[in-house]
Amino acid sequence: MSAIFHVLSVAGGLTLFLFGLNLMRESLIKLNNEKLKKVLEKATGSKFRALVTGVFATILVQSSSGVTAVVVALICAGLLTLSQGLMVMLGANIGTTTTAFIFTLRIEKYSLVFVILGYLLLLFNREKIRITGNMVIGFGILFLGIDIMNMGLSFISDSVYFLNLMLLLSENTLNSFLGGAVISALLQSSSVTIGLSQNLYALGSIHLKAAISIMLGANIGTTVASLIVAVSSTKEAKAALYVNVLFNLIGGIVFLAILSPFTDLILFLEKFTVNKKLSVAYSHLVFNILSALIFYFIYDKIIAFTQKRLNLRKQIDRKAVL
């Protein structure tokens, strides 16, 4: 009975997440006012500002999936361009690394506050205020879904069977990498997967190379899981999600290829810490920052290529309709 309840929690939480996303997306499309556009333009007016916005938004929310969902909604509503949205997602990859270092607000714990606030806005007669109320409710329901999913997933991740699976995967570097990706995709959270690898490494159950491999895989898994928000999204939003997945996939494979020297670097940094868990946290931070820097400097070329592909696809679709 307990297992069924937790499975239902995951399924129900995912349903709420998608419902909240759609409600917020529809409200943003209806709202689409100039003031909101100006605020977003200031926050994402340049590559660097968009990157920093993604970092701080994820530090505040502590959910790269949540930030990604909001970005998708904004792109679908025409409030963010493909270029701006993708750079915010890139910043979210860096922002999520702070989980292991700082105490966070965990905004999903206050999701019902947003639902209540949104409902109060629905009591007003002005249409724009009511639409804003729907948007706030959608935001609250989205994070309520994440919270309910986390409740179910925490039971699964704390089970003996799951722990044994993690230990089994750590026996081989490639298995650790692939296992981290699959587990992160299933749990919809790289933070949980990386947290488990931190604990196992701190206990001496797995070696650092395996823990880092799991971390690299977890980064890919969480972005693949984010593709679920591509359902009924615009072509621009889907393209942003695909590029984000590709960015993490290429970065993970490159770091896997240089795993031995990278592990040696982290072991050197470990000498200056008193907590072995921080070693995995350092590897997560270094990986995302270095990957982001490389991506940042080739960003314009990637956007130009992606935009060209999108325009070509739109031309093909128009011809098909005619």
Image (cartoon, rainbow, N blue to C red):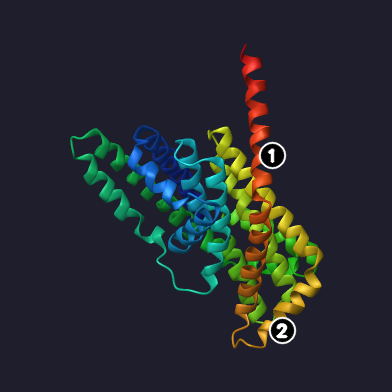
Which residue is painted at 69% across and 60% down in the image? 217
Q: Residue furthest top?
A: 322
Left or right placement of residue 254 versus residue 298 in this view? right
Looking at the image, is mark 2 or mark 1 nearer the viewer?
1
Which residue is painted at 36% across and 43% down in the image? 36
Q: Is residue 119 above or below residue 154?
A: above
Residue 75 percent coordinates (x, y)? 49, 39
Q: Which residue is mark 1?
A: 305
Q: Specify the amino acid type for callout 1.
A: Phe
Q: Residues within 10 Å of mark 1 (few under 14, many from 20)?
A: few
Left or right placement of residue 300 versus residue 112 in this view? right
Q: Specify the amino acid type for callout 2.
A: Phe
Name which quarter of the figure residue 57 lies in: bottom left
Left or right placement of residue 18 versus residue 115 in this view? right
Residue 35 percent coordinates (x, y)? 33, 42
Q: Is residue 321 above or below residue 194?
A: above
Q: The C terminus appears in which quarter of the rendering?
A: top right
Is residue 11 at least partly visible in the picture?
no
Q: Secondary structure at mark 1?
A: helix
Q: Which residue is mark 2?
A: 268
Left or right placement of residue 186 versus residue 71 in this view? right
Q: Residues within 10 Å of mark 2 (few under 14, many from 20)?
A: few
Residue 155 percent coordinates (x, y)? 52, 63
Is residue 130 at least partly visible in the picture?
yes
